[in-house]
């Protein structure tokens, strides 16, 4: 089957989020389960209808087994490829093939983590596990990853293209303005360019406001074949194109610190969709750090390489700007429980369903979603979503 034959054949029909921010006493599995039940109910289905599962978690090598048990599923299809926070966008394509081939009938893509309220002991175990696989080129300098690696990427972009700290601050402020329209967002206090620039430096050139939140939370969405989607209660959102790319793991091996693998994935996703950046009415971008948004806008084709700083200036991606970006507040201001990709998909779907409330983009028909994974923009996944009008 050619990729173009899958265009619009699979739809997302239900979404759910739960516990974003602080959820004391909730485990990662419980947060995921709550979001999953909401997504399945939103689709007008029951958990017994779910026979496909796509999930990943950085804290467990056999995470899908935990979820099968917790949700009492009996899936005929399981996808658990873990390439970091982009995994949940990357899960789309194999799940589309599974649905199209009849391997399963309804796929639940789900994630949950209690990163913010997790115990100190758990964090210590995580550090110990990471030390088993040190990078010989970076470890001697004791980086605090992922911030150190993304800071290096930002510094190179600034050096090569004249990007400034104020450009980075524009990204953070735009995310906050969107978050202020979202009752689910964790950080909704006022934030100005000066607040970002003058804040405590975390990893030069990043201040604390250039870095994503650390929260708890769960997110989930349900995928079915398009013909079935028409009979369900929610407006279907169709997957028009999707692709994944990776070029490195460590920043020392990044081919070009100013170009992410999105530059490889985006053309393939657009080709599958038969659309381009000019056709996208909004972008949901994995903003682990402010530089991620600038890099993604360039690599997704919204502006030329090096022009991302100018693109976001003067509120370019804030409400009322030239392109709505991260309309829920993103990882910088809405939610970021260690991995964010599923939340980006959920927000894109809700916008295209027209249920985003005060932050709704008027007459939204298309959206591009970007997932980012790894400690240095290592893996990237892109999805083009559309309403029935785009079929």
Image: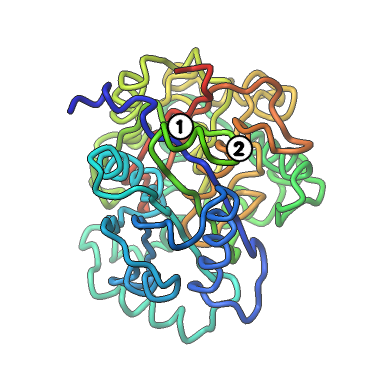
Q: Splitting the image into 4 quarters, where does residue 139 fall? A: bottom left
Image height of 356 relative to 112, above or below: above
How far separated are the C-alphas under marks 1 and 2?
12 Å
Q: Is residue 54 left or right of residue 368?
A: left
**What residue is shown at x 29% (from left), y 74% (from top)?**
131
Image height of 238 relative to 78, above or below: above
Q: What crowding class fits label 2: few (fewer than 14 Cα within 10 Å), some (14-19), or many (20 or more)?
A: many
Judging by the rendered image, the residue that carries numbered circle 1 is 296
Please state the horizontal and vertical placement of residue 385, each as a whole percent of the image.
Answer: 47, 29
Front residue of this view, candidates 387 and 289: 387
Check the image and name the residue furthest to the front: 231
Determine if residue 168 is in view.
Answer: no
Front residue of this view, candidates 167 and 246: 246
Please state the horizontal and vertical placement of residue 322, each as a whole percent of the image.
Answer: 65, 18
Please state the horizontal and vertical placement of residue 128, each as a whole percent of the image.
Answer: 33, 80
**What residue is shown at x 51% (from left), y 54% (from top)?**
220
Q: Which mark is residue 326?
A: 2
Check the image and name the residue furthest to the right: 190
Label 2: element kind: loop
Question: How are the colours assigned in the image?
Answer: rainbow
Image height of 182 relative to 170, above or below: below
Q: What crowding class fits label 1: few (fewer than 14 Cα within 10 Å), some (14-19), or many (20 or more)?
A: many
Screen quadrant of the C terminus: top left
Q: Is residue 103 left or right of residue 113?
A: left
Q: Earlier in the sequence, mark 1 or mark 2?
A: 1
**What residue is shown at x 67% (from left), y 32% (from top)?**
354
């Amino acid at each position: 089957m050619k990729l173009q034959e899958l265009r619009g054949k699979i739809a997302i029909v239900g979404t759910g989020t739960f516990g974003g921010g602080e959820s004391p006493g909730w485990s990662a599995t419980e947060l995921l389960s709550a979001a999953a039940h909401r997504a399945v109910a939103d689709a007008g289905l029951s958990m017994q209808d779910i026979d496909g599962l796509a999930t990943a978690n950085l804290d467990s090598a056999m995470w899908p087994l935990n979820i099968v048990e917790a949700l009492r599923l009996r899936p005929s299809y399981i996808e658990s490829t873990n390439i970091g926070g982009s995994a949940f966008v990357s899960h789309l394509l194999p799940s589309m093939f599974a649905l199209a081939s009849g391997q399963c009938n309804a796929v639940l893509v789900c994630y949950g983590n209690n990163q913010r309220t997790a115990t100190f002991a758990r964090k210590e175990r995580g550090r110990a596990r990471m030390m088993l696989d040190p990078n010989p080129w970076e470890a001697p300098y004791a980086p605090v990853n992922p911030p150190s690696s993304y800071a290096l990427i930002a510094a190179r972009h600034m050096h090569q293209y004249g990007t400034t700290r104020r450009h980075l601050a524009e990204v953070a402020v735009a995310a906050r303005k969107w978050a202020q329209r979202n009752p689910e967002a964790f950080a909704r206090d006022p934030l100005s360019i000066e607040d970002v620039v003058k804040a405590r430096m975390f990893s030069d050139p990043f201040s604390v406001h250039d870095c994503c939140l650390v929260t708890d939370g769960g997110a989930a969405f349900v995928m079915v074949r398009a013909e079935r989607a028409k009979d369900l209660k929610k407006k279907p959102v169709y997957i028009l194109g999707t692709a994944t790319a990776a070029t490195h793991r460590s920043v020392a091996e990044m081919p070009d610190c100013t170009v992410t693998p999105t530059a490889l994935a985006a053309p393939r996703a657009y080709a599958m969709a038969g659309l381009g950046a000019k056709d996208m009415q909004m972008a949901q971008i994995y903003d682990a750090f402010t530089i991620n948004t600038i890099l993604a806008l360039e690599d997704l084709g919204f502006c030329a390489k090096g022009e991302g700083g100018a693109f976001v200036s003067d509120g370019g991606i804030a409400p009322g700007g030239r392109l709505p970006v991260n309309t829920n507040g993103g990882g910088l201001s809405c939610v970021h429980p260690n991995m964010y990709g599923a939340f980006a998909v959920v927000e894109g779907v809700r916008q295209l369903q027209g249920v985003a409330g005060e932050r709704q983009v008027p007459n939204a028909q298309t959206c591009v979603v970007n997932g980012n994974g790894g400690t240095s923009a290592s893996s990237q996944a892109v999805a083009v979503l559309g309403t029935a009008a785009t079929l």
